[in-house]
Amino acid sequence: MRDKWWQDAVIYQVYPKSFNDTTGSGYGDITGIIEKLPYLEKLGVDGLWLSPVYLSPQVDNGYDITDYRVIDAMFGSNEDMYRLIEAAHDKYIKIIMDFVANHTSDQCVWFQESRKGADNFFSDFYIWQDAKPDGSEPNNWGSSFGGSAWTWDEKREQYYLHYYAAEQPDLNWENPHVRAYIYDMMRFWKQKGVDGWRMDVITSISKDQAFPDNARDLTTTNQQNGPRMHEFIHEMNQEILTPLDMMTVGESPAAKSWDAWELVSPEREELDMIFTFEHMHIDRKAGDVNGRWALQERDLVKFKDILSNWQLELRDKGWNALYFENHDRARVISRWGNDTTYRYECATAFATILHGLQGTPFIYQGEEIGMTNPEFELDEYVDIELKGNYQHFVVDQQTMTQADFLAAVHKISRDNARTPMQWDDSENAGFTKGTPWFKVNPNYPDINVAKDLKAEKSVFKYYQDLIHLRKTEDILKTGTYQLLLPEDEAIFAYLRQNGSKIWLVLANLSENMIKLEELMPLPDVKATVIANYRDRTNLSETLRAYEAVIIEI
Ligand code: TEU
């Protein structure tokens, strides 16, 4: 029987580069994470997921790995990492590392060898194809960062495949030696005490070996959920995950609520949880030529429908990973809510909805104090995805104006979440004594940990309370789920039920004043479990902007 500690856990994602710099280099470091362990302990989280800290040229902020077993000097040393694991374990906090094995950096020695020719041990570690007779790319597959997914290599005189930057060549999982090398790397970190893995784009590891064209240029029809994906993941489970008892949460851009069980159902012995992208697309125009930058108003009805489907589909068949923010996502209150007048209310309302669901909640650094998107000028952003997409949509394809692109950047770009953590109101928000690698959000004198901890309306304290509830109230873990008012465009309300115990989780995700009794018969209130407006004792009073509550009925 495998230990399912993660079903009782709340996990906190650290983006090490932007978390806490103790050396003045301008980059966060591992010692900085150790320094903040008491803070994380106080919040009450049970695990930390660290975005990549391995040796890397940082073309994609560490998601381009040169050596899986070496900590990049920018973050410290391997010894620092081992110290972190030990110090976290002393506080009963687990460590989850990022597993980026769909691709490596082009600086990885495997790739350096592979590009030398077709006849060495590493030749088939990557995906090489000849040019078409006219010299063009083998097919029309696109890179997430813009342009073709194929780059010509002068040395080997073939194209290699990369779903992301050209500096991130995709590994060839068809080659059993590749898989063996990856499993070995996993053993190495298990031996150092690592408890689990967040698996970067794990649903991309298998490629259709016929390399068919996508239906339309630069869509990703054939680039996800490849033919041997389940087989490879199952093999990894049997080789490593089950015997070494390592927890997994896989990033699964294409998974839908109805097929998610194929990855996370315990009988199938693949992954423990996956991160869906479905609910993150409620403000995207489907099928638009400008892809993820074609935005529209958030669709709350759809949002509720998607999250509810995941709750119902995975009930007894798997387990949900719950999140609104991570290092690829904007700040939820800036994207779908109000990050000024109702910043506290909005942050706590979204938190109530997320933490009331069944599954394992993930909190992204800064979310617990209601950090917001910065609104920088275009040239102040640094993300490779943003730059590549700008080139593709604005410059080459010319389907977006620069102004429209910038407006979308302000809403959804990945850099929104990557500004340095705001600890206090000292220079650079207390993140670094040097020059920060990426601009600090200028609102740090108002929004920072020190201030939030002292505030009467403290987002941090609300998160503490939510996390405490999860530890003490079984209904959050095991209770059934039922959505109420599915068609309402402002209220997100659902019931959790465990035997005779029933909780109503309710949030007004709008600024409208709403009388609940006009929408549904009011249940009797037994007790208020948690509320972001403290005077809330019943359901008959009007619901105010972003008011949220969990009530026992
Ligand atoms: O992300 C995969 C991925 O699909 C995103 O980059 C996507 O472009 C973004 O979420 C917007 O939809 C993972 C990592 O989380 C990301 O940071 C990496 O850049 C990427 O893989 C490559 O490793």
Image (cartoon, rainbow, N blue to C red):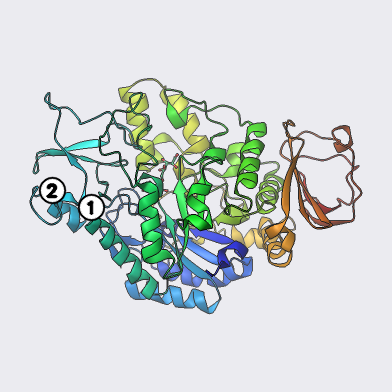
Q: Give above or below for 514 relative to 480.
A: above
Q: Evaluate whether residue 73 shows in this view.
A: no
For the point 35% across and 20% down, the residue is 398
Spot occupied by residue 542 in the image (x, y as percentages of width and height): 87, 39
Viewer-nearest residue: 299 or 76: 299
Q: Is residue 246 above or below residue 271?
A: below
Ligand 1 near label 2 (Cβ, under 8 Å)? Answer: no
Disc 1 C-beta below 8 A from ligand 1: no
Q: Looking at the picture, tell me which residue is in the foreground, 370 or 484.
A: 484
Identify residue type, mark 1: Asn
Query: Which element is circle 2 on?
Result: loop
Q: 430 or 292, which is in the foreground?
A: 292
Ligand 1 located in image quadrant: top left
Rendered location of residue 173, percent (x, y): 28, 51
How packed is label 1: few (under 14 Cα within 10 Å), some, or many (20 or more)? some
Q: Is residue 73 left or right of residue 273?
A: left
Instruction: Check whether the beta carbons of the residues at disc 1 and disc 2 lie within 8 A of each other.
Output: no
Please tell me the numbered disc located at residue 355.
none
Q: Residue at x 26, y 62 (%)?
A: 181
Mark 1 lies on residue: 175
Dot 2 alpha-carbon crowd within 10 angstroms: few under 14, some 14 to 19, many 20 or more: many
Residue indicated by mark 2: 115
Q: Position of residue 297 (x, y in %)?
A: 60, 28
Estimate the x, y position of residue 71 in percent, counting from the top left. Answer: 32, 66
